Amino acid sequence: MGQKLIGEFLTELAEDVDKLRAYLGEDRDDLLRESGLSEDQQEVLRSNDLKRIRDAIRAEYSGAQILFVPLGLQNLTVPQNITAPQNLTAPPEDDDEG
Amino acid sequence: MRGSLTVVGTGIQLACHLTPEARAHLIAADEVLYLVGDLVAVSSLQRLNANTRSLHDLYEPGRSRDETYDDIVAEILAAVRGGARVCVALYGHPGVFARPAHQAVRRARAEGFPARMVPAVSAEDCLFADLGVDPGENGCQSYEATDFLLRKREVDVSAALVLWQISVVGNLTYAPDGDPSRLPVLVEYLCRFYPREHEVVLFEAAQFPGSEPIIQRPALCELAAADISPATTLYVPPTGRRAVDRELRERLGLADASPARTAAPAVSPLSS
């Protein structure tokens, strides 16, 4: 049986609420000791360092790229001639009470 | 068999953010199509449903994202038309900065298929929690960074400003590692509204259970030199509090209330 991966361990947390509760609570060290992860892997997780954890997982999956993809742009290639309604461009009169 | 579509979000951390409702849809689906932000989430989805398929292959470096979005919608609709109960899983909230998801739901409904979206935790939700910011306190403006610049959005500096996808500002193609080369343009535009030394926040939500979010607090003028990942969101705190308008306060019958009280966000079981 090969070395357990950090990615595998984190996947188990997604499936087992009791494990997740232990990991996020006071039983974290016990859970990590019994996890099958190496000392180095445990240390990476104990660091809580997002970059270190992400890099370790990336290395485990043979350098696979983080799969972030942007999804949100809204037809920006189409010329826009929309103007804001007048009541949105004129700020209300303020006093100095705020 | 009649096809159907359910679009769910995995949240930013699937292990902690996946709702029971989303999980149920993922398990029950005939086919799961996904776009998620990390390999652990991929593995988790594959354990929930053996018939999963990534939509990442539709992205190509340098290709227009508009074209890719059209292909994503087409891929989803083809599966639904084939008669499958299709569940699409997207990272974060499936309806926040996720145009193809909304388009797929609309088109499926127009073709007579049952289709719905299940809400989830977005990066902005994590930002509010981790930075201790309540958008009800001063209001909050939220824009995609390129859209913000192209449309020359006006900024109300008394409200918070959130800019998404700053790592690819000005780049309409797929840039998997980000492309911060046009950040100076964004900084220059923001400096029309804010002091150059105004402290801003670069925020990246914690992606794994127990991990900490990445929070940097450079001055606005130092933003372009900061370490920015594809998942970084920019938060610009307000520079001051907007004054209460006396006339409107009286018309609302709040003349006797103190300004602080009238400005405070309502807290109720329905608004919180």
Image (cartoon, coloured by chain):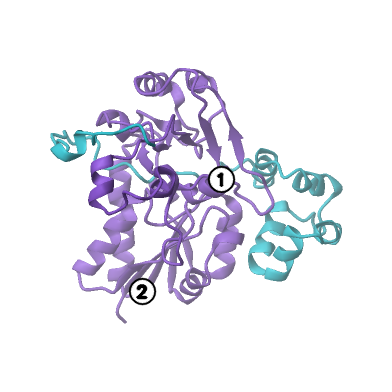
Chain colours: A cyan, B purple
- Badge 1 marks a residue whose secondary structure is loop
Residue appearing at x 52%, y 67% in the figure:
B19
Q: Please name the residue that numbered disc 1 is placed on.
A: B132
Residue B59, percent from left and from top: 40, 44
- Badge 2 marks a residue whose secondary structure is loop
> Is residue B138 found left or right of B231 in the rendered image?
left
Residue B46, percent from left and from top: 56, 64
Circle 2 chain: B
Q: Is residue A34 visible?
A: yes
CA–CA distance between discs 1 and 2? 43 Å
Circle 1 chain: B
Q: Please name the residue that numbered disc 2 is placed on.
A: B84
> Is residue A23 found left or right of B183 in the rendered image?
right
| Residue B236: quadrant of the picture | top left
Q: Nearer the viewer, mark 1 or mark 2?
A: 1
| Residue A10: quadrant of the picture | bottom right
Residue appearing at x 34%, y 20% in the figure:
B192
The kind of residue tagged 2 is Ala
Q: Residue farthest to the bottom?
A: B1
Nearest the viewer among A14 and B132 is B132
